[in-house]
Image (cartoon, rainbow, N blue to C red):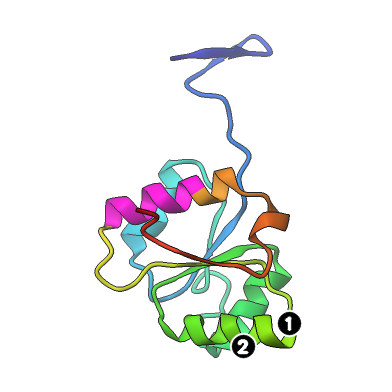
Amino acid sequence: RDYMVTGVQTCALPILSLAVYMDVHVPSVVTEGLRRKLLDVRTAQADAAGRLSDEELLARATAVGCVLLTQDADFLEITARWQQRGIPFSGVLFAPQGTPIGRMIEDAELCLAGLTADEFRNRLVHLPLR
């Protein structure tokens, strides 16, 4: 369905969503799929952060106000440790290796559009959701 916004016809109303920071372990097809959905998608590679340690990467995503999307299981331990120590982070979406690409894109979009920054803060969300 098309909408009229200030006299201009658009295909859809913009959805306010959280920005996502893509770990190097996530396939580029997921990055492109989320961008096609008009989400604010940033990558570690484009940010010259592709060689940071996992903890540095989580700190970087937090510093730029993004939820980190990763398939790196090391983040399960890192987020638990940060939660125990009270170290704040913007949130992590974790999809294990082998998660279907379409499901990862759909569920990440749902989380990023459906949760606020406060709801995501210091949380680890496992994908797929169902």
Q: What residue is shown at x 34% (from left), y 53% (from top)?
A: 130
Secondary structure under the numbered disc 1 in the rendered image: loop
Mark 2: which amino acid?
Arg
Q: Which residue is mark 1?
A: 87
> Residue 41's spot in the image, x, y percent?
53, 56
**Label 1 with label 2: CB-CB less than 8 Å:** yes
Residue 33 visible, this angle? no
Task: Estimate how packed mark 2 is, as few (under 14), some (14 to 19) or many (20 or more) residues with alpha carbons within 10 Å.
Answer: few
Q: Left or right of 76: which side holds 59? A: right
- Pointer 1 or 2: first along the chain: 2
Where does the N terminus fall, quadrant-wise?
top left
Residue nearer the viewer, 3 or 78: 78
Q: Left or right of 84: which side holds 14? A: left
Residue 35 visible, this angle? yes
Residue 103 sits inside the magenta stretch: yes
Residue nearer the viewer, 102 or 28: 102
Task: Estimate how packed mark 1 is, as few (under 14), some (14 to 19) or many (20 or more) residues with alpha carbons within 10 Å.
Answer: few
Residue 20 sits inside the magenta stretch: no
> Residue 64's spot in the image, x, y percent?
70, 66
What numbered label is drawn on residue 37? none
Residue 113, placed above or below residue 58 = above
Where residue 104 sits, quadrant-wise, is: bottom left
Residue stretch in magenta: 101-110
Q: Which residue is mark 2?
A: 81
Q: What residue is shown at x 51% (from left), y 87% (from top)?
A: 77
Mark 1: which amino acid?
Ile
Where residue 78 sits, quadrant-wise, is: bottom right
